[in-house]
């Protein structure tokens, strides 16, 4: 059997299949065209937005719209008023100027693109700090922080920057640049003493520095002492060198990779708020309660016939005889009383009894003024016998702390014979250093301990803060009152005093996180991706664990809390000396 093929029919079927496939593909493309274009447009738009954000974040040149530029120009006009005030070494009128700058900034924020909202918000905040500044140091500090945001904002728009001048002061330890409308330099940071201190900066150079385009040098993450002008490998460990921009070098930012962090024991923590309990420990000594010290003074002259209390330290009770005294003058006064009483009896039947009564009362009053009690005087009048040795009674209860008489001694009127002190309440007087006096207030609880009473702690209240300082020791004295019912506390004992004061919620950082360079105090901010930056802070109260921060960081910032001295060493090696506030750096630049 012979098979035959119909070739024309086969070719036709193939053509039909190809045409059908092409039509199907075209239809599918038509259906998917819109989603594909949307996807491409969205993806491309995101890349553009990201590029624009990076562009703005890096401070690269861009054009502000007319409304925003006009608002920023009004801000600069108010900024210029603040700058001129500080250049004249005064803060007179700076409150109004700061408020005007804050208002101009808020107005600019209303018309500016959202991307500039945070920057303008910070500028407005610093302007408010300038308006509230209590002294020129605080005003200049806030002015520098304001300039840290305003100068990059101006640099973003070449049209805005070209009409302004940018200067830099090498002597200023914080942000040291400022803007002027005139080319004649007037330094707001140093004032009249160094009005012409500084140098002019080209805006293009500053813009390149902001953009991170200028590389200062290349270094090794493991060996920060290595600095090379170009890329390569570390001559010590062979690692690839990393670039350090001029901006990072000037700010002291360093990069510490995870391996290095683990090797040196870096730990971090978030800045937060807490109530700060401050403890002040001082040394004091016990002494008599001055309001309970009494003197026994004679009101007449005579001779001590008998001394009933003859030792210092002896306890006495109110009304107890202290001594017996013979006084010719007192004896004569008693005789006068007896004669007056006799005359009173004789005159009782006469026509003038009142005069005799007057003489008796006058004689009794005289004896009472000399120290006799009313009962003793009445007894003399009743018995008709004068007392030769008058007993001197103690008017107070306590302990004899001073005895100035012996038996048989002649004593004169006005002479102090005994000093008596009550010891059921004792004073503790403590010397507090001048820097700690502000945290001590009347009524504050004090914990007092004594070597004489080991393990025992007594609580008292601060009764008084003396209104003067000891010029030799630069300490102020405070008084604490303690109950002493058992009389186990004795005057002139040494005491350890602990005073605690608690403030309200404050922004604090751990004590170990602060590096004191002398002129300034620094913490190290963890910026992420291994980047660590030294940040100047202004501190307040502190205790063994925490330090209050007044300026420099905010809640939520992450800081280095362990190995920060090693970080400090690396930062100092890698960065410009001026980042550390060294005196030499500033003068060298000048």
Image: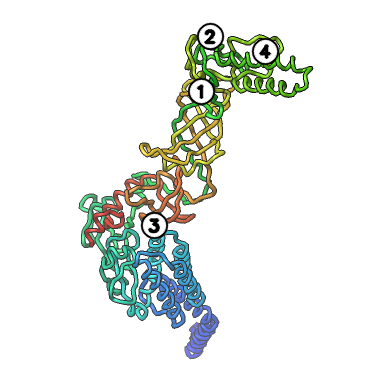
Label 4, on which residue? 380
Q: Return the disc, 1 or 2, that comes first in the chain's sequence.
A: 2
- State the image coordinates of residue 318 (x, y, percent, origin top left): 62, 18
Q: Do labels 4 and 3 touch, CB within 8 Å?
A: no
Tag in front: 4 or 3:
4
Label 1, on which residue? 414
Instruction: Please tell me which residue lies in front, 515 or 302.
Output: 302
- Badge 4 crowding class, 10 Å Cα cut-off, few under 14, some 14 to 19, many 20 or more, is some
- SS of the residue under disc 2: strand
Q: Is residue 114 left or right of residue 370?
A: left
Label 2, on which residue? 305
Q: CA distance from mark 1 to mark 2?
A: 18 Å
Furthest-bottom residue in this view: 8
Q: CA distance from mark 4 to mark 3?
A: 104 Å
Tell me what residue is drawn at x 24 percent, y 55 percent. Answer: 584
Q: Return the disc, 2 or 3, that comes first in the chain's sequence.
A: 2
């Amino acid at each position: 059997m012979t098979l035959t093929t119909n070739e024309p029919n086969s070719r036709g079927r193939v053509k039909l299949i190809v045409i059908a496939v092409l039509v199907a593909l075209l239809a599918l493309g038509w259906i998917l065209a819109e989603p594909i274009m949307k996807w491409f447009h969205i993806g491309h738009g995101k890349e553009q937005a990201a590029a624009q954000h990076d562009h703005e974040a890096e401070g690269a040149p861009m054009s502000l719209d007319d409304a925003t530029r006009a608002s920023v120009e009004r801000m600069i006009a108010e900024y210029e008023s603040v700058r001129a005030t500080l250049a004249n070494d005064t803060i007179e009128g700076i409150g109004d100027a700061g408020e005007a700058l804050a208002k101009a900034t808020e107005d600019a924020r209303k018309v500016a693109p959202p991307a500039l909202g945070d920057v303008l918000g910070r500028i407005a905040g610093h302007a408010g700090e300038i308006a509230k500044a209590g002294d020129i140091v605080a005003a200049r500090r806030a002015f520098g922080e304001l300039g840290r945001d305003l100068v990059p904002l101006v640099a973003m728009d070449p049209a805005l920057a070209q009409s302004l001048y940018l200067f830099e002061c090498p002597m200023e330890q914080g942000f040291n640049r400022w803007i002027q409308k005139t080319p004649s330099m007037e330094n707001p940071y140093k004032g009249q003493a160094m009005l012409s201190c500084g140098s002019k900066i080209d805006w293009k150079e500053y813009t390149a520095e902001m953009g991170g385009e200028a590389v200062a040098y290349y270094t090794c993450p493991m060996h920060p002492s290595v600095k090379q002008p170009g890329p390569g490998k570390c001559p010590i460990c062979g690692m690839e060198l990393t670039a350090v921009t001029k901006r990072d070098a000037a700010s002291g930012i360093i990069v510490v990779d995870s391996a290095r962090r683990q090797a040196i024991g870096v730990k971090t923590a978030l800045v937060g708020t807490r109530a700060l309990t401050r403890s002040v420990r001082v040394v004091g000594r016990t002494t008599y309660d001055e309001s309970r010290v009494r003197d026994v003074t004679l009101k007449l002259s005579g001779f001590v016939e008998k001394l009933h209390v003859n030792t210092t330290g002896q306890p006495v009770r109110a009304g107890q005889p202290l001594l017996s005294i013979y006084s010719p003058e007192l004896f004569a006064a008693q005789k006068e009383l007896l004669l007056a009483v006799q005359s009173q009896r004789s005159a009782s039947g006469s026509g003038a009894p009142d005069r005799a009564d007057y003489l008796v009362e006058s004689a009794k009053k005289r004896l009472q003024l000399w120290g006799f009690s009313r009962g003793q005087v009445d007894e003399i009048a009743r018995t008709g016998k004068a007392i030769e040795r008058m007993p001197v009674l103690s008017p107070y209860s306590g302990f004899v702390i001073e005895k100035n008489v012996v038996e048989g001694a002649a004593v004169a009127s006005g002479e102090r014979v005994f000093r008596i002190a009550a010891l059921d309440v004792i004073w503790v007087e403590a010397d507090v250093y001048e820097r700690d006096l502000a945290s001590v207030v009347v009524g504050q609880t004090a914990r007092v301990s004594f070597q004489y009473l080991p393990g025992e702690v007594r609580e008292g209240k601060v009764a008084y803060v003396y209104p003067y300082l000891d010029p030799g020791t630069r300490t102020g004295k405070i008084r604490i009152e303690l109950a002493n019912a058992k009389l186990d506390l004795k005057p002139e004992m040494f005491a350890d005093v602990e005073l605690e004061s608690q403030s309200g919620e404050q922004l604090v950082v751990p004590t170990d996180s602060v590096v004191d360079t002398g002129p300034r105090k620094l913490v190290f901010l963890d910026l992420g991706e291994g980047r660590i930056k030294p940040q100047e802070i202004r501190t307040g109260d502190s205790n063994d664990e925490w330090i209050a921060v007044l300026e420099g960081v905010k809640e939520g910032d992450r800081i280095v809390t362990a190995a920060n001295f090693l970080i400090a060493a690396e930062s100092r090696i890698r960065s410009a000396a001026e980042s550390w506030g060294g005196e030499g750096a500033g003068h060298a630049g000048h």
